Image: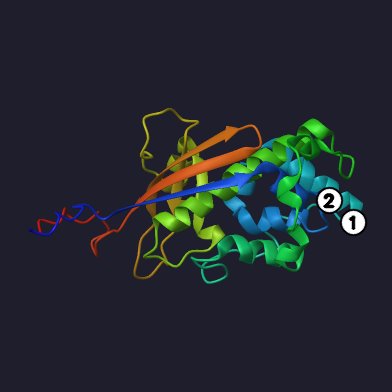
Amino acid sequence: MPPPIPFPYPLHIGTDICRVARIAHILRSKQGSRFIRRVLAPEELARAKPAIRHVLEAAAQSNGRRVSEPGAGVTGGRGQVGTGGTRDAVEAAVEGGRDGLVGSSDRQVSDVGKEVGGVESAVFGRAATYMAGRFAAKEAAFKAHPHLRLGFHDILILPSSDAQELTGKRALTELGSSAPVALIRGDGESSRDQMAKVSISHDGEYATAMCIGFEASESGHSQEPRRD
């Protein structure tokens, strides 16, 4: 029997699912603002939902500090959190170890809206839902780019209109300006920035995401299909 025909395109698919209450547990902790800044790059923080800003402001007030510039004091770039074990690495960085989250995934979604630091429940719930979606999208992007060493700040999940503003090129989507896309940063030397397809969905207590990435050739374009 002849061998099967190999998949002819250098594409990779990544998917992830995240429980909103699990993220809410982190946001409720002392390290909630650190988690946000660890996962979201400064460009994303500047464009994030108002609920994220409210959570950061509430955390700063409870600590007697002013909200610093987006991303200040926290790194999440290339080499900080690489592919493989990214979920554990970030949780350990903000919680001092995975044990701090044991049992949190069993909390009900109603617990997400618990008031924290003066942030009203609806706003806090939106922040947790938003972060769960972004976290799942970046985990999916890691899996869709196994050939790259990436950190959370090397992946920007942005509306296509914002991605076009940053890159000067039309984003790879026809779903409208609000549809998210992923901008994968190159290392600035041997690889260029590239776009990836991403889709985020929410249903009740879960956020899911899928990402399709490709392996670029040395010229910076996708490779030709293999004809093996």
Q: Give percent across and percent down for residue 182.
A: 45, 47
Q: Secondary structure at mark 2?
A: helix
Around disc 2, counting alpha carbons within 10 Å, would you say few (fewer than 14), some (14 to 19), or many (20 or more)? many
Q: Residue at x 64, y 40 (%)?
A: 130
Residue to which mark 1 is pinned: 63
| CA distance separating discs 1 and 2 | 6 Å
Q: Percent from the top left, x then y, of residue 176?
A: 43, 27
Tag 1 and tag 2, C-beta contact below 8 Å: yes
78 sits left or right of 189 in the view? right
Q: Is 174 rendered above or below residue 30?
A: above
Q: Which residue is mark 2?
A: 59
Q: Nearer the viewer, residue 24 or 159?
A: 24
Task: Say which amino acid is labelled 1.
Answer: Asn
Residue plotted at (50% across, 66% down): 84
- Foreground residue among 215 and 207: 207
Disc number at residue 146?
none
Name the residue at 78% across, 34% down: 110
